[in-house]
Image (cartoon, rainbow, N blue to C red):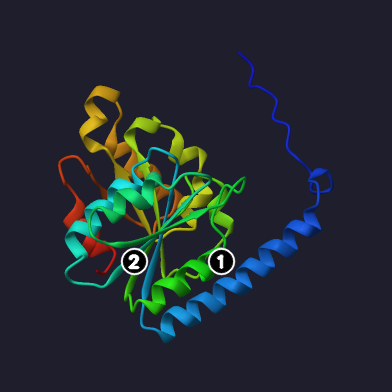
Amino acid sequence: MSKPEIIKADQDEVLDIELEEDFLQANRHMAELNRRSFDRHHVKVIDFMGSIGAGKTSIIERLSECLKDKYRMGVIAGDTATSIDAERVAKHGVLSLQINTGRECHLDAPLVRKASKRLLREGVNLILIENVGNLICPAEFPLGAHMRVVVVSVTEGEYMIKKKGDIFRSAEVGIINKKDMAGPMAVDVDGLVKDALAANPKMKVIVTSTRTGEGIKELVAALGL
Ligand code: MG
């Protein structure tokens, strides 16, 4: 069978390319201001990215259980419409705020600035950000966080890392979650670890199961917490 033809968008076929560049530039500038503010307040900030259902909230819940006595923590949860994630985190006794982005498929630096100001007033020294569930959009929008983490789960199948390399290149830590489902899903976890390291050789890759707690200690260490 012959290979299918690939049609690529040329620069002049991408609509509003200049407008988009301005947006990205403005976001990057605000992200730098956020970082300066976080550093001035001695707050460590970590941005968790990944698809809906990868387990970002579950990971943050597990981290909250481990770290809430060690740090004064705050969580910013991003979602298009609901407050489910912030409510789940709040049950662990952690200060949590929800951002609803409406039609936007990622958080941006100005929204995080607004939410983080509220948390800084409460004297937090660690902020975990759950980005909107999407494996593409957040990559281009830094928020000012000190570290970016990408979460994928074995239930997303065996090709998602190969297909979404950009977001792996933008992150320092990669989590392969739901290890407990690898058997039933017939997914090779070691293969996913290899794909993540192929996309970003500098990345620390941690295999976790939020159900069994496997890998959470290693994750805490990889995050330097
Ligand atoms: Mg979530």
Tell me which amino acid carries mark 1.
Ala
The local crowd at label 1, few if under 14, some if 14 to 19, many if 20 or more residues have their Cα within 10 Å, is: many
Badge number at residue 52: none
| Residue at far bottom of view | 40
Q: Is residue 9 left or right of residue 213?
A: right
Residue 60 in view: no
The answer to which image quadrant residue 72 occupies is bottom left
The local crowd at label 2, few if under 14, some if 14 to 19, many if 20 or more residues have their Cα within 10 Å, is: many
Q: Nearer the viewer, residue 217 or 98?
A: 98
Q: Is residue 95 left or right of residue 161?
A: left
Q: Is mark 1 within 8 Å of ligand 1?
A: no
Looking at the rendered structure, the secondary structure element under dot 1 is helix
| Residue at far top of view | 1
Q: Earlier in the sequence, mark 2 or mark 1?
A: 2
88 up-or-down from 93: above or below: above
Image position, residue 63 (x, y; %) = 24, 57
Image position, residue 187 (x, y; %) = 30, 29
Tell me which amino acid carries mark 2.
Gly
Image position, residue 131 (x, y; %) = 46, 53
The answer to which image quadrant residue 217 occupies is bottom left
Looking at the rendered structure, the secondary structure element under dot 2 is strand
The residue at 15%/41% (across/down) is: 212
Q: Which residue is mark 2?
A: 74
Q: Nearer the viewer, residue 100 or 62?
A: 100
Badge number at residue 109: 1
The residue at 19%/57% (across/down) is: 65
Residue 105 in view: yes
Q: Is residue 96 left or right of residue 162?
A: left
Q: Nearer the viewer, residue 221 or 112?
A: 112
Is label 2 or label 1 in front?
2
